[in-house]
Image (spheres, rainbow, N blue to C red):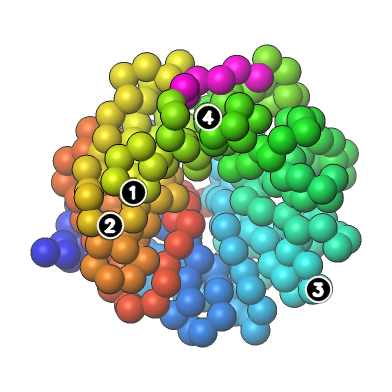
């Protein structure tokens, strides 16, 4: 049974950030084309991108004031930023290559993202104003899905070993270290804010499921434990206590929240559209 939105609000963590409202950003087709929405736990939502093109993969800046996302408004997928209320969208990348999954650094000064401009998928790093772009994964294979930890490490997925596996590297691209080693595919890592754990997607069971592990790859635990649904796109909450993810267990892709120990699953989007790529945000 789906739990009401009020349940998710009560479950929000406290701590020093308790005075700032925590909410979700997501990509949704509820208005037809893919749009970036903010979804609040009081049941309200807002179309932030509000245009007639495709908008994807939102990421909230650490101070909550800006949202990075990708949009094909100029024909190719490029990285944009806008204010948290959807105003003042600005294009950061340009060209005919496609870009994917921007993710803010912990101090808000840089954005990591994926581009295929070299022919294969590579992870790039640029300043928050779009300058100083550099390829930091710099490999001949496909590398994608960067996620920052609070201490500046970046987790990502790569197929350089044949199957898709999770690696960690320093922010500048050094010390690239493999942390999963399974014959199945592992991808879509999301670091906890304290950098101690990583949630990710794997197809080692009957279908894609959400797992969690220590940052060194140990103690891997299946959180979703589903044999009849697809579960993907996990993202840690701002205090690390919960994980938002996408599941089609009710017949269409929608957003769920689960505690980091695998308990207390709550269904929070019920609109019949395709909801995807959840990201947590704290209001400024």
User: Mark on residue 229?
Assistant: 2
Sequence-wise, the earlier of marks 3 and 4 is 3
Q: Residue at x 54, y 36 (%)?
A: 164
Sequence-wise, the earlier of marks 1 and 3 is 3
- Residues tagged 1 and 4 counted as in contact (Cβ below 8 A): no
What separation in Å lies between label 2 and label 1 (alpha carbons)?
7 Å
Q: Is residue 34 left or right of residue 222?
A: right
Residue topped by disc 3: 74
Asked which secondary structure carries label 2, the reply is: loop
Question: Relative to 110, is 270 above or below?
Answer: below
Sequence-wise, the earlier of marks 4 and 2 is 4
What separation in Å lies between label 2 and label 3 (alpha carbons)?
35 Å
Where residue 221 sits: x, y (%)? 28, 29
Residue topped by disc 1: 207
Q: Residues within 10 Å of mark 3 (few under 14, many from 20)?
A: few
Mark toward the viewer: 1 or 3: 1
Q: Quadrant of residue 143?
A: top right
């Amino acid at each position: 049974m789906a739990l009401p939105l009020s349940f998710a609000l009560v479950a929000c963590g406290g701590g020093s950030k308790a005075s700032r409202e925590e909410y979700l950003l997501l990509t949704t087709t509820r208005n037809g084309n893919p749009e970036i929405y903010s979804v609040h736990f009081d049941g309200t939502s807002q179309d932030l991108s509000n245009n007639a093109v495709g908008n994807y993969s939102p990421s909230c800046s650490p101070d909550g004031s800006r949202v990075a996302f990708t949009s094909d408004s100029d024909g190719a997928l490029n990285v944009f930023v806008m204010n948290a209320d959807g105003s003042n969208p600005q294009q950061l990348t340009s060209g005919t290559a496609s870009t994917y999954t921007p993710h803010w650094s912990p101090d808000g000064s840089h954005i990591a993202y994926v581009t295929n401009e070299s022919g294969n998928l590579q992870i790039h790093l640029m300043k928050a104003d779009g300058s100083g772009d550099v390829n930091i994964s710099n490999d001949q294979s496909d590398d994608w899905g960067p996620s920052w930890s609070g201490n500046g490490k970046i987790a990502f997925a790569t197929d350089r070993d044949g199957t898709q596996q999770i690696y960690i590297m320093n922010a500048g691209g050094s010390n690239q270290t493999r942390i999963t080693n399974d014959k199945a595919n592992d991808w879509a890592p999301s670091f906890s804010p304290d950098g101690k754990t990583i949630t990710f997607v794997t197809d080692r069971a009957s279908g894609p499921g959400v797992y969690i592990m220590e940052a060194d790859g140990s103690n891997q635990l299946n959180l979703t434990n589903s044999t009849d649904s697809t579960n993907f796109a996990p993202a840690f909450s701002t205090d690390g206590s919960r994980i938002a993810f996408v599941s089609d267990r009710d017949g269409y892709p929608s957003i769920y929240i689960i505690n980091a120990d695998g308990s207390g699953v709550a269904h929070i989007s019920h609109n019949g559209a395709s909801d995807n790529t959840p990201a947590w945000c704290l209001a400024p």
